[in-house]
Image: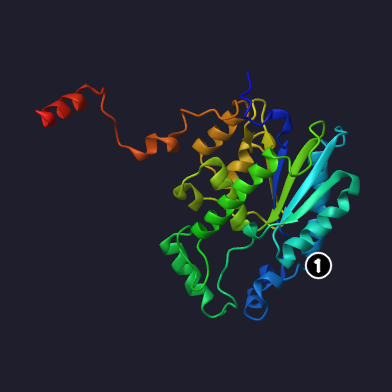
Amino acid sequence: MLNPNQTPIKSLPKRIILVRHGQSEGNLDSSAYSTIPDHKIPLTPQGIQQANLAGENIRRVVSDDSSSRNWKVYFYVSPYDRTRSTLREIGRSFPKSRVIGVREECRVREQDFGNFQVAERMPLIKETRMRFGRFFYRFPEGESAADVFDRVSSFLESLWRDIDMNRLHHDPSNELNLIIVSHGLALRVFLMKWFKWTVEQFEFLNNLGNCEFRVMQLGAGGEYSLAVHHTEEEMKAWGLSPEMIADQNWRVNACRGAWNEKCPWYLDSFFDSFAESDEGTEEEDDEKND
């Protein structure tokens, strides 16, 4: 029986789709960051084409190749020019009647690299980041991935409140698809937070390509998984370990809120071994109390 305080499975979004922006002028020529504020870096013509194609592909996914008749989409977008332009091009594939709404969300913006970048310094800074660790390294006058993790975590809390309180004005008879148009690192951190991946696991994740997207789809029991839509080969190419892929496969049929006891980073990876029983510890406690 469903807990009365728990959101019914039927009211949850069917999919949460994470989309990286199209190719930007900064992707094409990193010197652009020295003269153009990061948030104003535009898409290239190729980036616009990529976004158009992404819109067509995403529509095929949310409509189940046109077999579904009752689907809707709701967008969250980073305030940067390149993400908003990507959304604009993606939107060309969707009739207005299918779009519930869109919200600009500052917490899924790009990692802050520290205002205008000095081109001559960046190679050394990025080399230092690799030696220090990509997650904890903080760019001078900017952010670390850990900082991005904190604000993305805050966004996730708001996202769940939006869903639980039906702020998205979602009719439960429709299949809701949330589409988040953001940046490579922010999206990797989103996945890390959602699936409880460790810092060590994050370090092995590969960035999304321009206008690549990841589909988190609701499984049969109410848990989200990458394995509903994506293959093991795809997940391996993204940098997921065999254990992480096994966890995604488990989530396909897991009941909502269930705990994967075979998932090593939830417990076993933090300890070398455990006592065989609690008898020894109880005897030690008795001796200390005598």
Mark 1 burial class by Cα count in 10 Å: few <14, some 14-19, many 20+ = few
Quadrant of the drawing holding the N terminus = top right
Instruction: Read off the residue under disc 1.
Output: 45
Q: Residue furthest top?
A: 1
Is 120 on the left-hand or right-hand side of 70?
Answer: left
Amino acid type of the residue tagged 1 in the rendering: Pro
State how the image is colored: rainbow
In the displayed structure, would residue 152 be above or below residue 262? below
Q: Which quadrant of the structure image shows residue 65? A: top right
Where 92 sits versus 121, above or below?
A: above
Task: Let me know if residue 95 appears in the view.
Answer: no
Viewer can see residue 256: yes
Secondary structure of the residue carrying numbered label 1? helix
Quadrant, the C terminus: top left
Image location (x, y in percent) of residue 281: 20, 27
**Residue 192 coordinates in the image, percent (x, y):** 54, 47
Residue, far left: 290
Number of residue marks:
1
Drawn side of residue 175 relative to residue 252, left or right: right
| Residue located at (55% from left, 36% from top) | 245
Q: Nearer the viewer, residue 164 or 39?
A: 164
In the image, residue 63 lies at what x, y percent? Answer: 83, 38
Task: Tell me what residue is drawn at x 54 percent, y 50 percent.
Answer: 205
238 vs 113: above or below: above
